[in-house]
Amino acid sequence: MTERVTEPFAVGDVVADQTYWITREHLVRYAGASGDFNPIHWNDRVARAVGLPGVVAHGMLTMALAGRLLTDWAGDPASIIEYGVRFARPVVVPDDDAGVAVRVAATVSEARDDGNVALEITVRVGEQKVLTQARALVRPPVPDGARAE
Amino acid sequence: MPIDPSVVGRNYPPQPYEVSREKIREFAEAIGDRRRSYVDTQAARERGHPDVVAPPTFALIPVMRGFDMLMADLGIEFARIVHVDERITYSRAVTVGDRLQTTTRLDKVRQVAGNDLLTVRSEVRDEQGGDVCVSLATLLVRPEDEGGSGD
């Protein structure tokens, strides 16, 4: 019943890897939920006028999806101590039902003495990194059986 | 015209933001996150929270309102701003009922290739003055008379 993890987190371990899909509908929902109504996130005409190929996702929506990977892994939003990203490339969202696939993976970059884990997060569309310098400091999940209830 | 360097260090007064249950639910749905602690008080309590909590990047809602205030003060239109990077350090999770106070400060301005790069520090506190989180953001402001040819 009590599984013991002897060496819980080693540098280089990929602790989570997930693909999220972003559609135009997500952008509309996120605009309303976040209050970010910049038209480049819902209007192709405006997006093209500023030199984009079309409507792009809110950088902070992409950041939120990578954040989901972190909270899903850690088990709670309060486990995120620090989280930062650089919005390197726009995520173009096509006007179709499938949307665009964003693949997020988190790798341990440091296991600290206090038990916290530093993660390096890669966020890609196809082979291109859309977020760079994406890093988080997280209190890792407690292994089953070791949790103090 | 580049931003007048005398604005660096400008502090904006704390802006209130009250965290509602329905806004957290709406935000969690918008990012597709079905975690029970975002909608169910009991589930949140089982995780040791006083009530429903918000996803980590929810904190950017009040932070962005501060950006809007700063840009309005500097006379910069929304369409010229590009969010370059964002880093948040958390003291605790945002919780339903929080009456947040967000102070915004323009920490630094530098010019890079004809654009202004602004470093903006936002401190989010609760009603009692307790730290909730600190955001450090870089915002790029494109020059006013861009020809629209892109890069």
Image: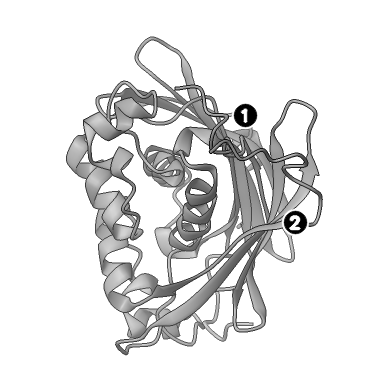
Chain assignment, label 2: A
Q: Please name the residue shown 23% across and 30% down the image.
A: B42
Crowd band around label 2 with a 10 angstrom C-alpha radius: few (<14), some (14–19), many (20+) = some
The amino acid type, in three-letter code, at marker 2 is Asp
Question: Is residue B95 something that shows in the picture?
Answer: no
Side of A55 where A108 appears, left or right: right
Image mark for residue B30: none
Q: x and y percent of residue B13 in the render?
A: 42, 23
Tell me where residue B62 sits by quadrant: top left
Name the residue beneath numbered marker 1: B9
Q: Please name the residue shown 61% across and 34% down the image.
A: A139
B36 and A96: which is toward the camera: B36
Q: Please name the residue shown 80% across and 57% down the image.
A: A12
Q: Does A36 appear above or below A51?
A: above
A98 and B138: which is toward the camera: A98
Q: Does A31 appear above or below B50?
A: below
B49 and B75: which is toward the camera: B49
Q: x and y percent of residue B92 in the render?
A: 48, 26
Side of B65 where B135 appears, left or right: right
Q: Please name the residue shown 53% across and 24% down the image.
A: B91
